[in-house]
Amino acid sequence: MANCFKSIGAAVAIDLLFTAASFAVPATTADLSGKKICWDNGNVGSYLAGGKYSSTMAGTGSWRATAVGIELHAEHYSGYQDVDKRPDGTFYSGLEHGAGHYCK
C-alpha cells in the first residue's frame, strides 16, 4: 500500500512540474521596458524605455511587444523573440534556448 502512495505522489509531483510551466504568459511591455535580462546562453538584452534595444549578441536597435512576441530590429538580428514570463518572475525564450532573469 505504501508503494502505491509513493507512485501517486510521484505522478502528482511530475504533473505539477509540467502544469506550472503552462502558467507562463507572454512578456509585456511593462515586464521588459527599462529592464535588462540575463539569459542562460550568455546574452544580455536591454529593453530600454522608448523602444531602444541593446544586446551583447544582436547589437543595438529597437524592440516592441506585439501579439506574436517581441519584435526586434538590431544590427545582427531582426525578427520575433518569444519571451514568456513564468510565475516565479523568470523568463523563457526558445530563441535564447533557455531561461533568463532580471540582471542585478
Image: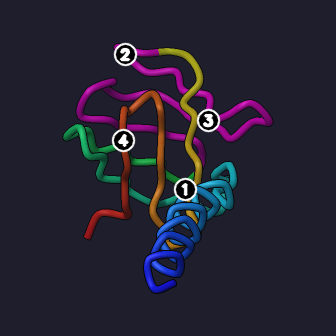
Q: Is residue 20 above or below residue 64?
A: below
Which residue occupies the extreme front position in the image? Answer: 1
For badge 1, the amino acid type reads Leu
Q: Quadrant of residue 96?
A: top left
- Mark-to-mark CA distance, 1 and 3: 10 Å
Where residue 2 appears, as percent x and y from the top left, is 45, 85
Q: Which residues are magenta?
A: 50-77
Q: Tell me the residue at 19%/40% (across/down).
A: 42
The reply to whether the C-beta atoms of the residues labelled 1 and 3 are less than 8 Å apart is: yes
Which of marks 2 and 4 precedes in the sequence? Answer: 2
- Mark-to-mark CA distance, 1 and 4: 17 Å
For badge 2, the amino acid type reads Glu
Which of marks 2 and 1 precedes in the sequence? Answer: 1
Answer few, some or many: residues within 10 Å of disc 2's Cα (few below 14, many 20 plus, some between 14 and 19): some
Q: Secondary structure at mark 3?
A: strand
Q: Which residue is mark 2?
A: 75
For badge 3, the amino acid type reads Ile
Q: Which residue is mark 3?
A: 70
The reply to whether the C-beta atoms of the residues labelled 4 and 2 are less than 8 Å apart is: no
Q: Is residue 78 above or below residue 84?
A: above
Numbered disc in front, either 1 or 2:
1
- Mark-to-mark CA distance, 2 and 3: 16 Å
The reply to whether the C-beta atoms of the residues labelled 1 and 2 are less than 8 Å apart is: no
Q: Tell me the residue at 37%/49% (across/down).
A: 99
On whether residue 55 falls in the magenta region, the answer is yes
Q: Which residue is mark 4?
A: 98
